[in-house]
Amino acid sequence: MNISYTIEELHLKAKQNKWLRHFTVFNRLALAAGFIPSGFVKITGERFTSLSVHHPMGHYLDALYQTGYYYTFIGVAQLVAAALLLIPRTATLGALLYFPIILNICVLSFSLRFEGSLLSSPLMLLANLYLLCWDYDKLKSIVSGRHPSPIQSISTENIINTNFPVKFFAGSAAVVIIMVFVLTMVFDIQPRNTKSDCALQCKKSKKPNACLEFCNCIHMQGQPLELCLRNYNSTYNDTSRQ
């Protein structure tokens, strides 16, 4: 038995499970709900955030807003992806369109250490990957240009498994918990959304004075995140408190 056949067999069993079908619908609805508000804001020509332009993400989003119809285009793409996800016949296409958009948001959030989407964007990316895996049979047929294999051709409409997939949901919960834990610990310092929020983390910092300088560098001086981080990392530990 080759690997491809094993994957197809597991995929077929998954699509026959009632609980996984419900979970798939939930992911489609959740991802669509995540893009509809942000997409609508863009196509109506409104600013997406109230962050200061001194903030790295605020500076980026302000520059994006100034691009004119490109800003609108992104909003349209988000709404189209959301709408396609909500229609069963076009859900696969919606997941494909959704993927590069959410991947870009995820990388951007990590790059700028933006707490607003530092947790949500990776979780949305995982949900998107799940939907792509759910449509593995369709994607394989499109990529290979071949007709579905015999096991892929088996209809799942009238074959329903009602057993609750404990291992799958336990594993998924474990992945989410680990991801949340790692993402909350991965950065020793973040810009936060405001200077006051940024300063709060300095109370527990090993370099409180350097941390406060970092907050000033971001929120008062509007310097690039990389420069502010370089200045922060170049200082020695300072246990004195202000």
Image (tube, helix red, strand yellow):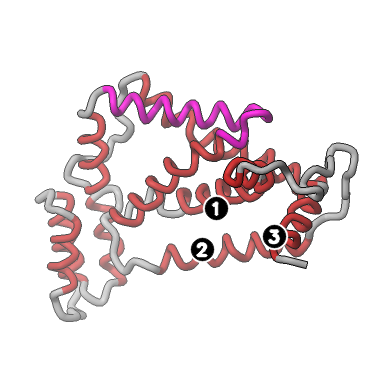
Q: Position of residue 207 (x, y in %)?
A: 21, 74
**Which element carries disc 2, helix, strand or loop?**
helix
| Amino acid on which disc 2 is placed | Met
Quadrant of residue 48 within the rendered picture: top left
- Give the quarter of the figure containing the C terminus: bottom left
Q: Earlier in the sequence, mark 2 or mark 3?
A: 3
Q: Residue at x 88, y 45 (%)?
A: 160
Q: Is residue 88 magenta?
A: yes
Q: Position of residue 94 (x, y in %)?
A: 55, 34
Q: Earlier in the sequence, mark 1 or mark 3?
A: 3
- Judge the density around disc 2: few (<14), some (14-19), many (≥20) Cα neighbours within 10 Å: some
**Which element carries disc 1, helix, strand or loop?**
helix
Viewer can see residue 19: no
Q: Position of residue 240 (x, y in %)?
A: 18, 78
Depth check: give the residue in front, 153 or 88: 153
Q: Which mark is residue 179?
A: 2
Q: Is 178 situated left or right of 204 in this image?
A: right
Q: Earlier in the sequence, mark 2 or mark 1?
A: 1
Q: CA distance from mark 2 to mark 3?
A: 29 Å
Q: Which residue is mark 3?
A: 4
| Amino acid on which disc 1 is placed | Leu
